[in-house]
Amino acid sequence: MSGKPKKMGLLTSGGDAPGMNAAIRAVVRTALNYGMKVTGIMRGYDGLLSGDIIDMHARSVSDIIHKGGTILRTARCPEMMTEAGLEKAAGICRVLSLDALVVIGGDGSFHGALELSRRGINVMGIPGTIDLDLSCTDYTIGFDTAINTAMDAINKIRDTSGSHERCSVVEVMGRHAGYIALWSSLTGGAEEVLIPENGAAHNSKERVIGQIIENRALGKKHNLIVVAEGVGGSEALAKEIEKVTGIESRATILGHLQRGGSPTALDRMHAAYMGYKAVESIQNDEVNRVIVFRNGRHESMDITEALNSDRPYDNTMYDIIKMLAR
Ligand code: F6P
């Protein structure tokens, strides 16, 4: 980069997450404050490859801080998994004279950015996914709104589950990770939670049914079982519980409603800090990095290091859920 960076591209990619709009607003307004131009790229890497771009100014991001989804739209882009797609995307960034490309998204989106950085494009990642499944950061934009949505749904299911004295199985999102399941179970007061991190034996129908029978002996009239989508099989589990215990059981898959809604204050706060920090880092000539939240601070981390970081699974939350469910 010769001189101060003047122009950046901005895209949202992968599954949308509440708070992405607040992050877009923060990036655009901070960039304008530094005198940078912002090119908005529609529908993630798809829009980059097809040249679907817009100029962004202060008023482009008015009245979006409270809105779910992303005004830039988003997509999953298989072409970015190919050599030809990556070369083409890097070439378009050069034609657009982007001094940096800001990517708001999750793991797959960051891998796309990493590949672009290997082809000479300066990239900056902002973690946006409801799954909280990026090991490099303690927070990803969208997680708090998603767990509040899941908790709210669990509250409602609890009402009907209690009235009918049923067992309710609730399946939540999270891809291969159990964070949404754990947090919504703790805050929703679930009796049991099945997450990929605990392994197949622990998640077996036999063990869960044994727990429900034990709960009946403890005087519990109904049960709430949360299942992470990475474990799946909630319909089959509900059927088996009913067959073995005689307790009426129902499964509810929460699905995509967990991805929508007005972002919570926590999501908006992280979006503002991360968006601001991303642009500030670019201004300080930091490139090929990701903004992370670690030890209570927002900071930037090398993108290769970020994608190679490891966060060992800690069973404490599961143990607390189980202890409080007795
Ligand atoms: O990554 C967010 C997420 O909602 C995951 O929890 C889920 O596995 C996936 O996206 C669903 O993706 P899609 O909306 O493409 O079906």
Image: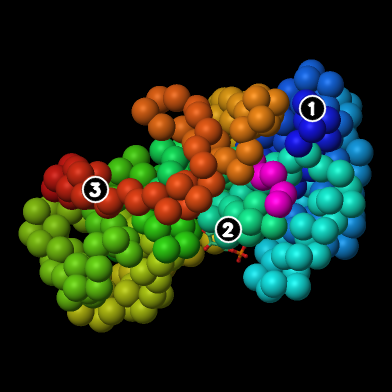
Q: Determine whether the residue tagged by mark 3 lies in a helix, strand or loop.
A: loop
Circle 2 residue: 111
Q: Which residues are magenta?
A: 120-124
Residue depth check, mark 1 versus mark 3: number of the one nearer the observer:
1
| Type of the residue with mark 1 | Gly
What residue sits right under mark 3 in the picture?
314
N-terminal of the two: label 3 or label 2?
A: 2
Among the 4 quarters of the image, the one containing residue 38: top right
In this view of the protein, which residue sits in the foreground, 126 or 321? 126
Magenta stretch holds residue 140: no
Relative image position of residue 286 (x, y in whole percent): 62, 33
Residue at image mark 1: 3
The quarter in which the N terminus is drawn is top right
* In front: label 3 or label 2: 2
Label total for image:
3
Q: Is residue 122 magenta?
A: yes
Q: Secondary structure at mark 2?
A: helix
